[in-house]
Image: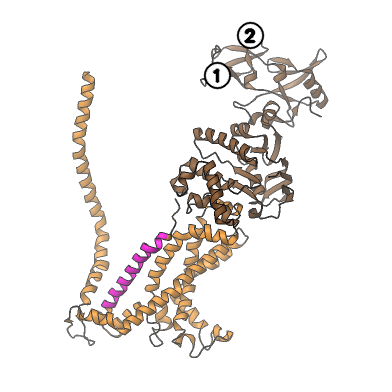
Chain colours: A orange, B brown
Amino acid sequence: MSALANEAGLDLAVETRRPRRRRSRRIRETGLAAIMLAPALVVFCVFVFYPFLKNFDLALYRVPPFPNLPSTYIGFEQIGEVLGSQEFLDSVWTTVLFALLTVPTGIFLGIVLANLAHQKLKGVGIYRTIFSSTVATSVAVASVIFGTLMNPQVGLLPWLGIDPHPPILDNPQYALIGVAVATIWQNLGLSFILMSAGLQAIPEELLEAADVDGASAWSKFRNVTVPLLSPTIFFAVVVGSIFAFQTFGQIDLLTQGGPLRKTNVLTYFIYTELREQKNPGKAAVLAIALFAITMVLTLLQLRFLERRVHYAR
Amino acid sequence: MSGIALEGVTKRFGDVVAVDDLSLEIEDREFLVLLGPSGCGKSTALRMIAGLEDPTAGTIRIGDRIVNDVEPKDRDVAMVFQSYALYPHMTVRRNIEFPLRSRHVDKSERDELVADAATSLGLTELLDRKPGQLSGGQRQRVALARAIVRRPLAFLMDEPLSNLDAKLRVQTRAELIELQRELQVTVVYVTHDQVEAMTMAHRIAIMDQGVLQQIDPPQTVYAAPANLFVARFIGNPPMNTIAATVVSGDGELAVELPGCSLSLPPVVAKAVARVDPAAVIVGVRPEHLEIDDAGRVPATVAVIESLGHERHVVCRLEDSTMIIVRQPADMMPPKEGTTVRLAAPPEHLHVFDAETGRRIDGTTA
């Protein structure tokens, strides 16, 4: 009996001691975490949070186009002005069009190539290397290659008989498509690698089961492969869209936003406002707009597209 | 419904021969178990029947059709995979329905067949769940339902019970036997578990290193193993095997074991005389050995293992060969370390040619 009471008493003592010790340990660990996170926090504050907030501030000032003149506070006037302008709406439309041209095509081609390379064949490794090689090329290289291909004097397309006047990249009708093709090609390597990884994650037995169950190649692809690839496709859509909305290099190298501003995507618009028009206020408004559009688009994708994604358990 | 025949089927993966010249005939409505240790080629053989692997040589027939060049989807067999291979993004209903959709069965008939299959496997409540929400046993039943829903010519099962816990396995085993009787369908069932093979099969085909060792009803495989591999593979604990020499005395043949000699039954003796092997291996099952003072084989008791319902007495012969004797639990156990004598009835002695491993008995040519 006494032993039992003793045991109970001991238990009680432990119970009362434990929370205090746990709390002090938690405080110590939190302190340690704060110290270890501090350097990263400083870097983020200087290079991310401050510029991000400063951008909102900039949007509230009108900066005169000549140096050394004071900028004037004008509140929300400039924001309304820029967002209401035809120039801005055109640029947004161009950007959206560019994303629509590049993202679905890039993913589709990635899936096709990944399926082609997902075979147990001799020498298929060579094709995998070729298909993924554009990952190792820069935007500049892709732009130079396609700039040359579409060049009216030395290019391959005119030689093939595809030779519109004015030449593709100077043609308001085709310039955006030309840039999109270069972009698709450049992104294809990444798309291929993503889709290949996704395909490899699909258990071989599921496809074999579908074989035995009598599914045709197309039905197998549509009913088994694509649904199981959907997390990868979803990821590629979200990340691809963000990339597409931030395209700059190929526009700068191939068309400089022209002809007739037909390739003036938002990032390039921001750049010209800042560097050529020397108008940081307007550039800041555009940057905020780009941020908002990208965020809303991503949220919409997460909200509506993700419903159709099947995460394997 | 129809039989399946393999004729001289060989499968090589590079230099590795997975299945070597396999010939076997599976009768219509037969439950055939392909049994063997892992890597023996049993799964490869099954996958060739399904059409998931192409044989390097030989022909495969399902019914009266040679199917070597027939795609898996056109072979009209159903397969249950070890991992069940359920489509994770489809509900149970869609999973079961998939083979019917693939064959363009119309909706009303499809619903009826799915309902039938679900009822017979107790899945009706689960039709709208996804595989991720099911237990192992339920998933296994969905895989079975997907197989039975379209009444294929044959069922191919690749270790379908090995992912279940022991208790569920015993229960599902019985259910599978019932299902096969009810559907009257040919089943080819791959397993490495001899208990599954013994309890479920009409005939067992035992394979080792790609080669078919024996194909016979379970009782024959147990009572008259065709060679040493089968003798040692079937039975738990396995058959005791003792190296011995053949001696002739008093006009009859006997085998000389460590410490004694045992005379052979006339039929076996005649066969041994005919084959005239250089050396033999004598086999005797643990349950056929008795600890008996009148026994002729001297042995020392090493360890006694009690299993509750029975006891395994592990003994060593004079040449330290290990021998297991199976005793009912109600018998007096010998003391560890003592010397006992073992008796074995001559009709339960199995004799194998030490060189070839083949069984020598009255049927030996």
- Residue B37 visible to an observer of this rendering: no
* Three-letter residue code for mark 1: Arg
Q: Residue at x 20, y 47 (%)?
A: A27
Q: Chain of mark 2?
A: B
Mark 2 surroundings: few (<14), some (14-19) or many (≥20) residues within 10 A: few
- Judged left or right of residue A273, residue B104 is right
Q: Quadrant of residue B283?
A: top right
Q: Is residue A185 above or below residue B16?
A: below
- Judged left or right of residue B99, residue B362 is right
* Three-letter residue code for mark 2: Asp
Q: Residue B293 — which label? A: 2
Inspect the magenta stretch and tell me whether residue A297 lies in it. Answer: yes
Q: Is residue B185 above or below residue B238?
A: below
User: Which residue lies most toward the front here?
Assistant: B108
- Residue receiving disc 1: B311
Inspect the magenta stretch and tell me whether residue A306 lies in it. Answer: yes
Q: Residue at x 62, y 60 (%)?
A: A121
Q: Is residue A184 above or below residue A115?
A: below
Assign the N terminus of chain B to one quadrant of the image: top right
Which residues, given as a range, are shown in magenta? A285-307
